[in-house]
Amino acid sequence: MNTDKGTHPVNITHLVMGIAFAAMAVLWALYAGGTVDPSSYRWLLPLPWLAAGAAGLLATVLPSRK
């Protein structure tokens, strides 16, 4: 258990799914609000998964560099 300064290890699964869910909610809000054109929505759909995957890779790699 890590007790220094109130930090704790990152749960990578929760991080990845949280980022994916938040990004999908933002995309839905943009689409529902009419901000995003339906023709451009098709290429925006993979962005939440790419962002979540990148965050997961960073969370995996960065702690091992210490």
Image (cartoon, rainbow, N blue to C red):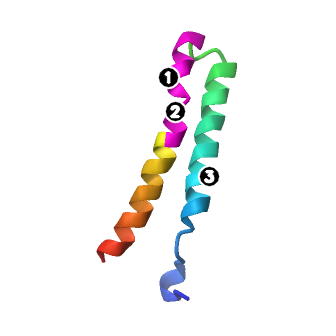
Q: Residue furthest right?
A: 32
| Residue located 52% across and 26% down the image | 44
| Residue located 45% across and 53% down the image | 55
Element assignment for label 2: loop
Image coords of residue 13 (percent x, y): 59, 61
Element assignment for label 1: helix
Q: For this rendering, which residue is in front, 64 or 3?
A: 64
The dot on residue 20 is none
| Residue located 35% across and 74% down the image | 64
Q: For this rendering, which residue is in front, 60 or 29?
A: 60
On the image, which quarter does residue 41 sit in? top right
Q: Identify which amino acid the numbered label 1 is placed on.
A: Trp
Q: Which residues are magenta?
A: 38-49
Residue contact at pointers 1 and 2, CB within 8 angstroms = yes
The dot on residue 46 is 2
Q: What whole-number distance in Å separates the C-alpha atoms at marks 1 and 3? A: 21 Å
Q: What whole-number distance in Å separates the C-alpha atoms at marks 3 and 2? A: 15 Å
User: If the image is split into quadrants, where does the N terminus sit?
Assistant: bottom right
Image coords of residue 47 (percent x, y): 49, 34
Disc 3 target residue: 18
Disc 1 target residue: 43
